[in-house]
Amino acid sequence: MAKTLKLSEKNKDFFEMVYQVVRLIPEGRVTSYGAIANYLGRRGGARMVGWAMNASHTQREYVPAHRVVNRNGVLSGKHHFPTEKPMQLSLEQEGIEVKEDQILEFEKFFWDPQQELDWD
């Protein structure tokens, strides 16, 4: 019988690229699942980036997953953290105000890897 691979195993290289990008997000800034997908050449791959974020806790090197939110600045991944409000608390410790699970002044804190990272 053939071995069935988990989604994270099938996409290991893509997930690792996602983690590399997320580790580059500066403290006090956030990006979106879609912005990461676009940067990695997977337009429309926001959900896949979300799956990578769900598995990020398995990495040896820290992945600041709290800095990745949906395209509207909503903390859509908050339920994947181990306690009730760690995503919001982590963002607030970095100077980002959150109200009702949404980043206030999202545009001000948005970090676009397409704009910020050098392709060379």
Image (tube, rainbow, N blue to C red):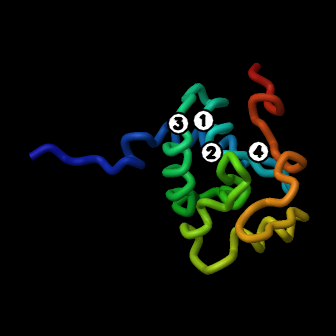
In front of the other: label 3 or label 4?
3
Distance Cα–Cα, label 1 vs label 3: 5 Å
User: Would residue 52 appear left or right of 22 to someone viewing this image?
Assistant: left
Q: Are marks 1 and 3 in contact (CB under 8 Å)?
A: yes
Residue 81: mark: none
**Which tag, 2 or 4, sits closer to the chain's start?**
4
Looking at the rendered structure, the secondary structure element under dot 3 is loop
- Residue 93 occupies quadrant: bottom right
- Whole-percent x and y of residue 52? 52, 50
Distance Cα–Cα, label 2 vs label 1: 6 Å
Q: Residues within 10 Å of mark 1 (few under 14, many from 20)?
A: many
Residue at position x 42%, y 49% from top?
A: 8
Mark 2 lies on residue = 33
Mark 1 lies on residue = 37
Distance Cα–Cα, label 2 vs label 3: 8 Å
Amino acid type at mark 4? Leu
Q: Residues within 10 Å of mark 4 (few under 14, many from 20)?
A: few
